[in-house]
Structure formats: C-alpha cells, structure tokens
Image (cartoon, grey):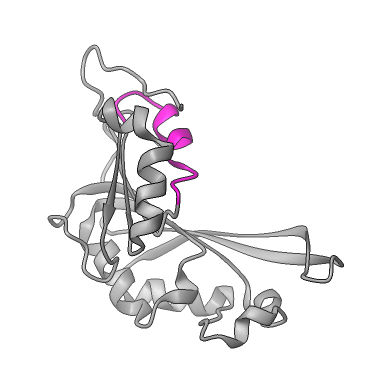
Amino acid sequence: IAPGDRILETGPGNGAFAGEIVAVQESVAYVGIDWSPDMVRQAQALHAGLIERGCVEFLLGDSQALPFEAQSFDKALTVHTIYFWDDPARHLAEMHRVLKPGGRLCLAFADRTFTEKMPFARFGFQLYRVQDAMALLESAGFIVEDVQQIVEASRDETGAVIDKLLNIIMATTAPAQPATNGAAAGASRCKAD
C-alpha cells in the first residue's frame, strides 16, 4: 500500500480490514462494497469514526456491476467471496475494469481440498483449487504475480483440529506503470478506531 492509494474491497462483510488498510500509509482511501444491507450497516457502525474522517466508505452493491468509473482504484482485495459468485468471470472482469493500469488485486480463499470436506459446501458453494482461480484471473486479463498457500489449524463443527489450506493470489493489470508517490502535501494518516 502506497501513500494516496485508493483501495476497493468487494464483499468486506463488517469491514474487518478497513482500519488496518487506511492506517498503513498517508491519504489511503478505502471503499468496501457488499451485497448485504446488514453487513453494510454493521461496517458503517463499526467504522463510524473513519467514515466521518473521510478515510473509509461502505456501499451496498454487487461486485459484478461495480458503480465506479474505469481505472478508479490502485488496489483491490476480495477475501472468502469467490465461493458465492454465480459468474466469477464477470466479477473479476469488473475488478479489472475499475483497477488502474498496473493495479493489483489480492484474491484470498480456502482451497477446495479443505472446503469440500466442510458440511456447508453442499449448499451451493462454488469451490476452487488455486489453479482454477489462476485460470479465471488470467481469463479476466490479470497477470498472476504471486501465489501463496498457507496451512492453518482450525476446528471443524465437532471441535476436531483440522488443517485449512488458504490460497492468496496476487495479480496485476497490464501494463504495469512505475510507482508514483501520490501523497498530497500535508496529508494525514487515518488511524483505526
């Protein structure tokens, strides 16, 4: 995250990452868009101070039809959302559209090898392996830069300890432009509430 970055999160839920994101550098702006009115209200209540300072915004909407101009954001992230997308290509194409040239996307999700064993998986979730998500990203015009797979211990519904495989994919739009310092003179850093 660089000073002056405008960052989009699709499906932020209650905005758990918003405060950390805007506190990293000066003049960082965060926009979260979620389809759930309840989650948007919860995020707005939780981050009222950051909203009042103009650092954070939460909107009701759908990531397959983002209400933003093309090339509006420097970076985007989406965490544990891909399972719910009926048309993942459309969601990713929209994120590609709103990212600036050289913009970066972080896509994070639990791997199919873990999620297919969970009881909720039979209720309409779309499950992915890292290779599947990489192919979707590349089809949407992204260039995959880095893939990390992290194993963390978790508990299932019976309380048994299980290993959860998490995928974190970093991708960029092309062509990548040299980084610039977009921080305004006298800019201030937003601190998390």
Q: Magenta stretch mostly in which secondary structure?
A: loop
Residue at screen point 35% across, 42% down? 44
User: Which quadrant holds residue 13?
Assistant: bottom left
Could you tell whether 70 is left or right of 175 in the image? left
Question: Is residue 30 at least partly visible in the picture?
Answer: yes
Q: Nearer the viewer, residue 131 or 111?
A: 111
In reply to whether residue 18 is colored magenta, the answer given is yes
Q: Nearer the viewer, residue 151 or 125?
A: 125
User: Which quadrant holds residue 158?
Assistant: bottom right
In the image, is residue 11 above or below residue 181?
Answer: below
**Residue lying farthest right?**
160
**Residue lying farthest top?**
186
Q: How many marks?
A: 0
Q: Residue 125 in the image: x percent, y percent?
A: 52, 81
**Residue lying farthest left?**
69
Could you tell whether 166 is left or right of 42 in the image? right
Q: Nearer the viewer, residue 81 or 38?
A: 38
Residue at screen point 45% across, 75% down? 84
Question: Is residue 134 at least partly visible in the picture?
Answer: no
Could you tell whether 112 is left or right of 59 in the image? right
Could you tell whether 171 is left or right of 93 in the image? right
Residue at screen point 65% across, 76% down? 115
Q: Residue 180 in the image: x percent, y percent?
A: 26, 32
Q: Residue 78 in the image: x percent, y percent?
A: 43, 59
In the picture, which quadrant includes the N terminus? top left
Q: Residue 7 in the image: x percent, y percent?
A: 32, 44
In reply to whether residue 55 is colored magenta, the answer given is no
| Magenta-colored span | 14-28
In the image, is residue 47 above or below residue 104?
Answer: above
Residue at screen point 30% across, 33% down? 51
